[in-house]
Amino acid sequence: MTKKLGSTPSSEFPISLTFFPRIGIAAMRGNFGGAWRLWLITKNLDNEGRGAIPSSALLTYADYLRLNSRTLHRWHNVAGDLGLIHNVTRKSGERWVVITSHEKAAFALGCMHVDRRQAIIPAKALVSTGWRAIVWAGFIATLPGRPISRNKLREITGVPKSTQRNYEKNAGVRRIPNYILSDMTDDFLPGIREFERPHAFKYWDNEQKNWVVAWRGPDHRDASNVAECGVRGRSRKVNKKIKILQGLSPVGRAPFADNNYLRLFNKKDSETKSSLRKLANDDIPPWEVQEIYEHKHDGSNAQFWKVIER
């Protein structure tokens, strides 16, 4: 989305920003949030992909965002030290800002793997006091409808569980619970509670016409009130170049790549078949994964899944 500013009617300026959330999260963890935000702003202003923008365009857009000159100057200095941007003067005397690539920015900020998809957030939200929560919401938006535990989110991002909760509360992210229904009747409930799942309970399954053992799975989250999931972009190329910057061979699969993990929660038949094929290859030890889950139906405020054992 773009908006024309009255001061420069011939130019178009974005009212929303597109970004890889894990780069932003890495910047937050390294206390380089201002430098990253300035780089992101310049990157989104570069509509033509030239790798540079006029300094005047940045100043006009900063004024539109109500970003004061002191803050802009401080961010600019840190971004320059990190190699995210630098100034040049053309022969005409016009000053331009040169912008580094996604992979170099990610590497400089300590992000070793970018997201499969980019997120989209309102531009003014990035310079608000709650911008960290908005960036986290952007990350959540790239996982639409995907049940994922807080421990897994911490493993991927390095963000502590308590901080995740605070971000989601501040951004208004909605949590949707997921319940898993087994094919075991409630006669097995005492043993399941004692040896496997202390919080298991019995649930009436209309399909089986019987009480079955059930338990709660990891939640999935909805951040659509503040962020959107963008289209799949250059993530593979960016991740490949990051590996080269690390001094690693670009051949092979990056961590958390799509075909490098087993999908536990499967909404489509094709996803279930793919997961079962991976289990059949015996690459995943049986003590690590004993079952996967297939979508059963949606409730009014929850989703329900059924167990498929390997």
Image (spheres, helix red, strand yellow):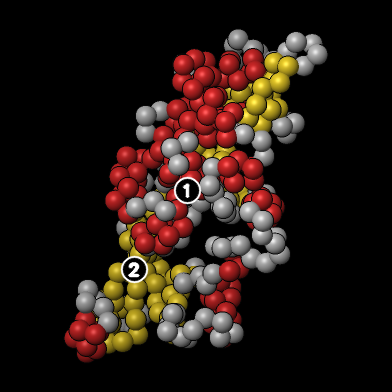
Residue 123 visible to the viewer: no
Quadrant of residue 53 in the image? top right
Q: Is residue 1 above or below residue 67?
A: below
Q: Is residue 177 above or below residue 63?
A: below
Please, what secondary structure does the residue beneath circle 1 have? helix
Residue 14 visible to the viewer: yes
Residue drawn at the location 75% of the way across and 10% of the way down = 93
Q: Exactly how many numbered labels are in the figure? A: 2
Residue drawn at the location 21% of the way across and 81% of the way down = 193
Q: Position of residue 109 (x, y in %)?
A: 54, 42
Q: Front-most of 24 and 187?
A: 24
Q: Amino acid at mark 1?
A: Phe
Quadrant of residue 305 in the image? bottom left
Do tag 1 and tag 2 residues touch (Cβ < 8 Å)?
no
Please, what secondary structure does the residue beneath circle 2 have? strand
Q: Position of residue 135 (x, y in %)?
A: 45, 41
The answer to whether residue 241 is left or right of residue 76 is right
Numbered badge on residue 217: 2
Please report whichever mark, 1 or 2, sits nearer to the chain's N-terminal start: 1
Q: Position of residue 184 (x, y in %)?
A: 31, 87
Disc 1 or disc 2, which is closer to the eye?
A: 1
For the N terminus, which image quadrant? top right
Q: Is residue 207 above or below residue 65?
A: below
Residue drawn at the location 21% of the way across and 77% of the way down = 198
> Mark 2, residues whose alpha carbon is within 10 Å: few (<14), some, or many (≥20)?
some
> Mark 1, residues whose alpha carbon is within 10 Å: few (<14), some, or many (≥20)?
many
Numbered badge on residue 139: 1
